[in-house]
Amino acid sequence: MKTPAALLLCALSLSCGSNKSSTPSGPQSLNNGATLATVTSYWANEECVPGYVMGIEFAANDQFQTIITGSGPGSTTCVGNVGQYGQGGYLTLGGSCSGATGPNGSYMEIEEITSISGSTASGSMTASLTTSMQPGVTASNCAFTLVQGKQP
């Protein structure tokens, strides 16, 4: 019996015990590389949450990294693992953060991403975000652009 991690890795690979190939869909289609060390691009947004610039990297091994810069000094970097993949393009993010805090005193972080559409292949992604910067508020229809290279 395969573990959930093995099943996810199997789903992310082009072959999983068969000769059929498939293109990842949903959240898995957003991956920027195999691991955070090998990502070659990231997702960028400057308008979703007013006053904040966001960058997100997703890796095929379930790792993510976000860098969020607010209108104040500094930025917050969060690194961790995708906690849950759900139906209809749903991700929960759980990790540790460091750097600047937002106006409410907490780290500026993305807690969950829903209603995901798009792919690395298309170079664009639309999603709704729940963040620590706007507790209890979901920012809808956030447009992200794929940027080549590592996050600054």
Image: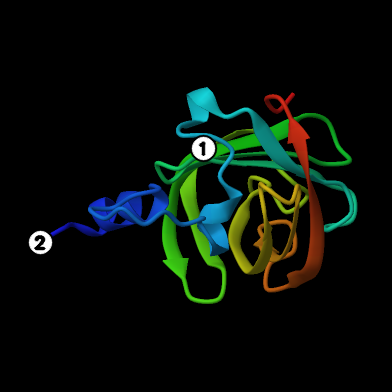
Residue 82 vs residue 28, the one in the foreground: 28
Q: Is residue 56 above or below residue 11?
A: above
Q: Is residue 54 above or below residue 8?
A: above
Q: Amino acid at mark 2?
A: Met
How many callouts does the rendering have? 2
Q: Quadrant of the C terminus?
A: top right
In the image, is 63 to the left or to the right of 57? left
Label 1: which secondary element: strand
Q: Residue at x 87, y 47 (%)?
A: 46
Q: Quadrant of the N terminus?
A: bottom left
* Circle 2 residue: 1
In the image, is 148 to the left or to the right of 10? right
Quadrant housing residue 43: top right
Give the image location of residue 143, x and y in percent.
82, 58
Q: Residue at x 68, y 73 (%)?
A: 136
Can residue 96 be seen here? no
Quadrant housing residue 112: bottom right
Q: Would you say the residues marked 2 and 1 are in contact, meaning their CB atoms lie under 8 Å apart?
A: no
Q: Residue at x 63, y 28 (%)?
A: 40
Give the image location of residue 148, x and y in percent.
74, 30
Q: Amino acid at mark 1?
A: Val
Q: CA distance from mark 2 to mark 1?
A: 30 Å
In the image, is 80 to the left or to the right of 97? left
Residue 99 vs residue 123, the one in the foreground: 123
Quadrant housing residue 61: top left
Residue 52 vs residue 62, the one in the foreground: 62
Q: Which of the two labelled residues, at mark 2 and mark 1, occupies the earlier sequence position?
A: 2
Comparing labels 2 and 1, the label whose residue is closer to the camera = 2
Give the image location of residue 12, x and y in percent.
41, 51
Can residue 8 be seen here? yes
The tag on residue 79 is 1
Q: Is residue 107 above or below residue 114?
A: above
